[in-house]
Amino acid sequence: MATPADHNRLIAQAAKTALAPIGCRRKGRSRLWYLDRGYWLILIEFQPSSFSKGSYLNVGPQWLWGPEDSLWVSDDDDNRVQEAGFIDFENSDQFKPLITRVADLAAQEALRITDEFKSLDAIAHRLSMHATQRRIRLIRTIYSAAVATGLAGDIAQSGEFFQRLRQWPAQFDWEKAHQREGARLASLLSTPDVYRAEIFNTVNRNRELKGLPTSAVHF
């Protein structure tokens, strides 16, 4: 008879086979893996269901320049890999080939995201588009677009995003934290070296709090 440990073990085995060769690491003994890109991570979550044993698949970036320092979740709710669907665990023989396929999809998606955000200019461009188009957790997207465009040297565009951030009708503490940090960074845009240094310090602080080495950051 299958035990709860069986399907978690199969997920871990499939994830290790597919993800370790491309540089991903597992967070402890969780169902979360990550690919370290320095000032951002690609998070890969084999998300459980509240109703049955099995797994969804979420893959997406997490930017490490924000005021939140303890989250191991994606910055965006649009990261569900629809092609993977939900893999329901019935028994080990049925589940193993399905989760192997899902883990392979996770690796493919991680590599696709790596290519999509292959440079700081590409990141600034994509985040600018996301800040215009996306609604989910938009304040985080606007904040990241402001930071990235400032790092890429587009001071005018960065200032516009920081202004939008200031005007956001914040209700929650995490939203207000983004506004406070955004206002502080906006005041530094006229001194690019100081601006970059402050973001570098934030990234390294968040990396340290996540247990990541602080020497891997390069803008």
Image (tube, rainbow, N blue to C red):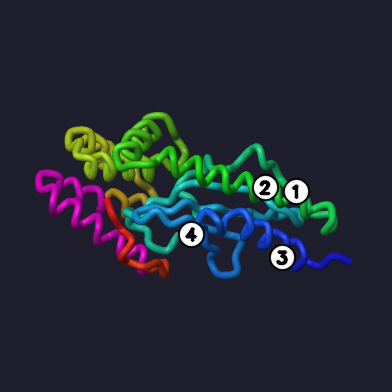
Query: Distance of mark 1 from mark 2, alpha carbons?
Result: 6 Å
Amino acid at circle 3: Arg
Q: Secondary structure at mark 4?
A: loop
| Residue 39 appears in the rendering | yes
Q: Where is 150 relative to 209, above or below?
A: above
What is the chief secondary structure element of the magenta stretch?
A: helix
Task: Give neighbour class at mark 4: few <14, some 14-19, many 20+ (Cα, 10 Å).
Answer: some
Is the C-beta separation of discs 3 and 2 under 8 Å?
A: no
Amino acid at circle 4: Trp
Residue 33, x across and y down, in percent: 54, 58
**Magenta part of the chain:** 180-208
The numbered mark at residue 9 is: 3
At 54% across and 47% down in the image, what residue appears?
59
Is residue 197 found inside the magenta-colored segment of the image?
yes
Q: Looking at this rendering, what residue extends furthest in the front direction? A: 21
The numbered mark at residue 102 is: 2
At 27% across and 45% down in the image, what residue appears?
147
Query: Distance of mark 3 from mark 2, alpha carbons?
Result: 15 Å
Q: Secondary structure at mark 1?
A: helix
Is the C-beta separation of discs 2 and 4 under 8 Å?
A: no
**Which of the two labelled residues, at mark 4 and mark 3, occupies the earlier sequence position?**
3
Query: Distance of mark 4 from mark 3, alpha carbons?
Result: 21 Å
Frontmost of labels 4 and 3 is 3
Is the C-beta separation of discs 1 and 2 under 8 Å?
A: yes
Is the C-beta separation of discs 4 and 3 under 8 Å?
A: no
Residue 124, x across and y down, in percent: 31, 38
Frontmost of labels 1 and 4 is 1
The answer to whether 161 appears left or right of 40 in the picture is: left
**Which of the two labelled residues, at mark 3 and mark 2, occupies the earlier sequence position?**
3
